[in-house]
Image (spheres, grey):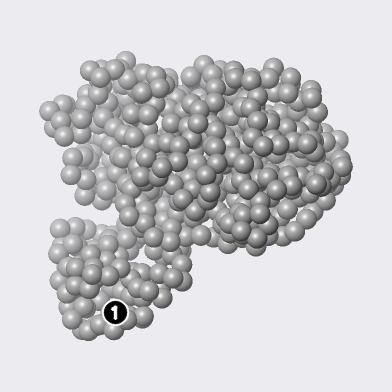
Amino acid sequence: MNNQLSFIPLGGIGNVTKNMYLYEYNDQILIVDCGLGFADETMLGVDLLLPDISYLLNSAKQNKKRIVGMLLTHGHEDHIGALPFLLPQLPDFPIFATPLTAAFANAKLKDFKAQKRVQTVKFNEPEKSIGSFRFSFIPVTHSVSDTSHIFIKTPVGNFYHGSDFKFDDTPSDGKKSDYAKISQLASQGTMCLLSDCLGAERAGRTQSDIGLLEHFNREMRECKGKFIVTTYSSNIARLNQIIKASVDNGRRICFVGRSLIRNREVAGDLGYLNLKKDIEVEIDNLKNHADNKLTLIVAGSQGQENSALTRIANGEHRDVKLREEDVIVFSSDPIPGNETSVYELVDTLTRRGVRVVYSPVSKDFHVSGHGSLDELEQLIKLVRPKKLIPIGGQYRHMFAYRKLAEKLGYHKNDIFLLEDGQELLFVDGQVKLGRTIPTKNVYVDEISGEELESFVLRDRQKLSEAGIIIVLAEIDSATGQLLGAPDIIVRGFLYDIKHLSSKLSQDMHKALNPRKARVTNWIYMRKLIGEVAERRIFKDLRRRPLVLPVVIEV
């Protein structure tokens, strides 16, 4: 047996999403987090990105290593969202998380009909053991309740896994970070601190969220129509602030969007959501209430193409129609990489004549869940580690974090700026770089941001079995209508292209005809064309090739 621990990030290093980290001791592997990433507008036919777990699969087969367990830090998608996709590929092992995180994860697993479940650990429980590892959950503040840091004891040394956090001493939910527990555990010695670094470019401290309630109250009083808010569906503390302001202003609440409805149920069952039944309105009863007596909490703050908010913006939601008196508030910032999608959605909403409040217009309705420089420094001083690894940020954030650590007296060779797949070895108090494990993006197709549908992995097997169809459609930007018949390119199987083009032309005219308006959201238009094509191809061929829609603006 070697007295050596191997730390391997499979995601979350150099990027904000796909968080997944391995602690490997001899033949045992402990996993922390299992998150997904989000595709950008250049990734045609892709909605989500997953960590590449090839190393885990190969280690089990070739090196006889076993996964002894998994720990989850908090309930955001970039930390738990990959569970239903990846767990079916892995052997059985225990998974632990704090109450709300476990509940969110289990609801997601249930939706995907996965059999595995996450076990609940409360913050006040004594440390637990998995194989050669022992761990304790530490409460910290973030933009989702029950967020934790994890103190991991190994035979080689102790590790403080400090994922997403800020030190908010006046949080709206009253749940503060446990500084005493951090200090008590750190006093046992810390080999390495892995720290959130996303706020490392911001001076000072991150603003508390407690002041947002006043701004919601003010805006609701002035709104003469529906008050529509979009935020992360997991931000239960924010939902409680919106609910309280609505009650204070005589407004009833309606949740719109699958992810919000699911998380409302989960948080309500645990007693985390302060929502009385008599103030909630079901979506099919909205017409029975005056607009100025309604608050709609709507999913889709990141501009997801099939989200409730995108459908509302495009006039395609069955139950929610916009009027000029309505106000729409984005109580969130775009996730890095999602800026284009979010601002295109803002443009589409603005063209419908409603007032849209978002971060560049007003900072009154969202505060970051990530600590700024003073909080990052505070954590370093509380933990007093020998080595540091910035995680959960892009490379510029990691670089800024290293500069902070150097100002605190750490040498550059004590701070490791890694890449996904770069192994770091801890041996007899020494640290050195190990192997570089190849990692790649794993693409998931046909998943909307808010509604769970069927899914497939975009890999070569699908292309070889089902083929690919490229649909080129010319769209009049002024009217949103199809110009001429679409051009079709088919690879991987034989089909009468003229017949398909004719049928597709009819279907697209039918789908586009009711719109007849200037196109402002081309990402949404491309998605619509793709969905029409997929339905026609499946109807005629009973097969699901990869469909790549190419929309040409004329």
Residue at 71% across, 37% down: 132
Q: Is residue 475 visible?
A: no
Location of residue 121 with respect to 192 vertically, above or below:
above
Residue at 22% across, 48% down: 315
Nearest the camera: 422 or 155? 155
Location of residue 178 with respect to 446 vertically, above or below:
above
Q: Secondary structure at mark 1?
A: strand
Residue at 74% across, 47% down: 26
Quadrant for residue 456, please give it.
bottom left
Q: Quadrant of the C terminus?
A: bottom left
Question: What percent of the width, then of the height, locates residue 186?
Answer: 76, 25
Question: What percent of the width, then of the height, locates residue 187?
Answer: 79, 23
Question: What percent of the width, then of the height, locates residue 153?
Answer: 73, 32
* Amino acid type of the residue tagged 1 in the rendering: Ile
Nearest the camera: 199 or 225? 199
Asked whether, in this view, residue 449 is left or right of residue 79, the answer is left
* Mark 1 lies on residue: 488
Location of residue 500 with respect to 439 vertically, above or below:
below
Location of residue 448 with respect to 160 vertically, above or below:
below
Question: What percent of the width, then of the height, locates residue 333?
Answer: 48, 40
Nearest the camera: 239 or 85? 85
Q: Is residue 212 visible?
A: yes
Asked whether, in this view, residue 10 is left or right of residue 95, the answer is right
